[in-house]
Image (cartoon, rainbow, N blue to C red):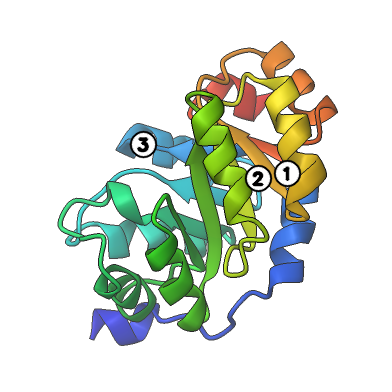
Amino acid sequence: MAAVFLRKKHIPRRDELYDLLHKTPVIPAVKSSEGLRECLGGDSGIVFVLFGDILTIPGIVAKIKEAGKLVLVHADLIDGLTSRDVAADFLEEHTGADGILSIKPNLIKHAKSRGLLTIQRFFVLDSMSLFNIEKQFPLEYADAIEILPGLMPKIIRKISDISKKPVIAGGLISEREDVRLALEAGAVSVSTTNSSLIRN
């Protein structure tokens, strides 16, 4: 019954996501109930959910949707979900989530086939990981990409130049200067759990 009630009537299109990303330089990434409460009253039109489990995620998503916001769930961080396609199936069928974030290309591909918005996450740890990321372009099934950590303006610039998709910088963003440098380097938005950056 809850699944039917929460099921979204309107599936956001890629251009709606792009428009929201451009309007939202700092995206709240919530990882706790406290962070959830703080984001509900904020101006951001998009929220990344980085916590929960298969029992609580429908309610978490419902609260954010009731606040009129686009919700993308980090499928890899939800307790009880696996890296298999069924994770995207569950989020599409049993929550009101508009999309997912994941480091797993197979999950991104399947989520896209289910009509969900998709953000492919990449950890840039060294030159080899950067090389492997570049080999994956044009990332046919990802609507946008997120680069972590987000404190590497040169890398953000390089990936922005070749990706042809919106680039989000995330991870270790803790000061307003971090936000400025990431945006100047070509990121369309940054994601952060730092509530002081979200409020300002």
132 above or below 112?
Answer: above
Q: Which residue is mark 2?
A: 44
Tell me the distance, in whole angstroms, between the alpha carbons under discs 1 and 3.
19 Å
- Using a 10 Å C-alpha cutoff, classify the residue at mark 2 as few (fewer than 14 neighbours), some (14 to 19) or many (20 or more): many
108 above or below 193?
Answer: below
Q: Name the spot of residue 141 as percent of width and height, x first.
A: 57, 69
Q: Residue at x 56, y 26 (%)?
A: 127
- Using a 10 Å C-alpha cutoff, classify the residue at mark 3 as few (fewer than 14 neighbours), some (14 to 19) or many (20 or more): some
Q: Which marked residue is nearer to the observer: mark 1 or mark 2?
A: 1
Q: Name the spot of residue 38 as percent of width and height, x first.
A: 48, 35
Tell me the distance, in whole angstroms, between the alpha carbons under discs 1 and 2.
6 Å
Front residue of this view, candidates 101 and 83: 83
Q: Residue at x 29, y 46 (%)?
A: 77
Tell me the distance, in whole angstroms, between the alpha carbons under discs 3 and 2.
16 Å
Figure quadrant of the N terminus: bottom left
Q: Residue at x 39, y 66 (%)?
A: 106
- Using a 10 Å C-alpha cutoff, classify the residue at mark 1 as few (fewer than 14 neighbours), some (14 to 19) or many (20 or more): many
* Type of the residue with mark 1: Thr
Q: Is residue 179 visible?
A: no
* Type of the residue with mark 3: Lys
Figure quadrant of the C terminus: top right
How many circles with numbers are drawn on the protein? Answer: 3
Marks 1 and 2 in Cβ contact (< 8 Å): yes
Q: Which residue is mark 1?
A: 24
Give the mark nearest the N terminus, 1 or 2: 1
Q: Is residue 193 visible?
A: yes
Q: Residue at x 84, y 26 (%)?
A: 184
Q: Name the spot of residue 96 as percent of width and height, x first.
A: 42, 72
